[in-house]
Image (tube, rainbow, N blue to C red):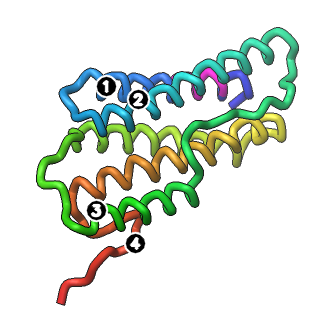
Amino acid sequence: MTLEEAIKTALEYEGKVHRVYLEALNADIGEEGKRVFRALCDEEKRHLEYLRSRLDEWQNRGELREEFLETAIPGRRAIDEGVSRLRKRLSGGRKTKHDIDLEMLQRALQVEEETSNFYQEMVRTLDETGRLLFQRFVEIEEGHKAIVQAEIDYLRGTGFWFDIQEFKMG
């Protein structure tokens, strides 16, 4: 796959993820869910803009200048710390009513995983220019998946947060 094809394919993946988050925002979900989906939707919109600018530069100049991709989503460590604080705050009991539609979160996780897998493949197979472009996306997508999975785990009441068992039976 050429770099131009990879960027165009990345635009398709990011567009799909963005549409899932837009659909979730239009669904009948609670305010907490809307905040999570809004943050992720906005993030995906910035990814689309970034990739379009990279494609334009590649098509017009035949090269890419290094341009750092910002993210509003915290890294894995910050997410883990936030979950720890949330767990302490909720230790008095769990919500009985789910504000977020679990089906939307599962769809979001699926498209985030597909997108992440694509970026990992591009990092493995493209030349240095492509690796530099897509490596940041791999890092960001890991954060997106962690957030969505944490929401799913909480709503399901599985007793797991980021693959860490919160309690043991017996």
Q: Which residue is tagged 2?
A: 38
Q: Estimate how packed mark 1 is, as few (under 14), some (14 to 19) or many (20 or more) residues with alpha carbons within 10 Å.
A: many
- The mark nearer the N terminus, 3 or 4, is 3
Q: Picture coordinates of residue 18 (x, y %)?
A: 44, 25
Q: Which residues are magenta?
A: 7-12
81 shown above or below 125: below
Say whether disc 2 or disc 4 marks the residue closer to the N-terminus.
Answer: 2
Mark in the foreground, 3 or 2: 3
Q: Amino acid at mark 4?
A: Ile
Q: Amino acid at mark 1?
A: Leu
Q: Position of residue 163 (x, y in %)?
A: 40, 68
SS at circle 1: helix
Q: Is residue 157 above or below residue 63?
A: below
Q: Report if residue 157 lies within the magenta region.
A: no
* Mark 2 secondary-structure assignment: helix
Query: Is residue 11 a member of the stretch shown in magenta?
Result: yes
Residue at disc 4, secondary structure: strand
Q: Secondary structure at mark 3?
A: loop
Q: Which mark is residue 90?
A: 3
Residue 25 - label: 1
Label 2 – label 1 distance at C-alpha: 7 Å
Q: Amino acid at mark 2?
A: Arg
**Distance CA(mark 3)–CA(mark 4):** 17 Å
Instruction: Look at discs 2 and 4 and give the one toward the viewer.
Output: 2
